Amino acid sequence: MAVSQHPYRQDMPPSGGFEAIKYKRNLPVRGPSGVMILTAVTAVCAYGFYRVGAGNLEKRELQREKVWSRIHLVPLLLAEGDRDAYRRQQAALAREKEIMKGVEGWEVGKSVYHNQRYRPADSIVVL
């Protein structure tokens, strides 16, 4: 066997060791954390529910006001309707008197129906 000319030298790490292997991902922090997003969403939803509740209260109050204003206007509207019906009836009687002035035995305003039951004039359908 032949003896080697060079002295034996084992391969060793450098003094102080090798530098650490970079195997972790280096991701920068981008944006707020999940807890902050959840807190913000909860706050926005709470404010939205508050506004919806306040809007419902206001809408309910406006509806109540509208109902009461209609209740208070009913007598006035009925009186106006009665005045209009009376005016129309008088105008219809005047027209009837003018149209039928030459007919012998015609009584203006007398019902053409031969019964005692009341029929308002606007319920008669003329074709």
Image (cartoon, rainbow, N blue to C red):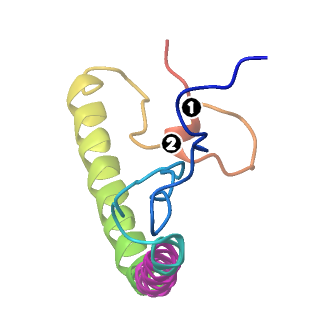
In x, y percent, where is residue 108? 38, 40
User: Which segment did they paint magenta?
Assistant: 40-66
Describe residue 45's horizontal placement relative to residue 117 as left or right.
left
Q: Are marks 1 and 2 in contact (CB under 8 Å)?
A: yes
Q: Residue at x 52, y 32 (%)?
A: 6
Tag shown at residue 124: 1
State whether residue 123 is above or below residue 26.
Answer: above
In x, y percent, where is residue 1? 79, 17
In x, y percent, where is residue 77? 37, 71
Choose between 16 and 108: the one closer to the eye: 16
Identify the residue at the far top of this view. Answer: 127
Describe residue 82's horizontal placement relative to residue 119 as left or right.
left
Question: Would you name the residue on which mark 2 appears?
Answer: 121
Crowding near pointer 1: few (<14 within 10 Å), some, many (20+)?
A: few
Secondary-structure class at tag 2 = helix
Secondary-structure class at tag 1 = loop
Residue type pointed to by label 2: Ala
Residue type pointed to by label 1: Ile
SS majority, magenta: helix
Describe residue 84's horizontal placement relative to residue 117 as left or right.
left
In x, y percent, where is residue 124? 56, 31
Q: Residue at x 74, y 49 (%)?
A: 116
Tag shown at residue 67: none
Image mark count: 2
Q: Residue at x 43, y 83 (%)?
A: 47
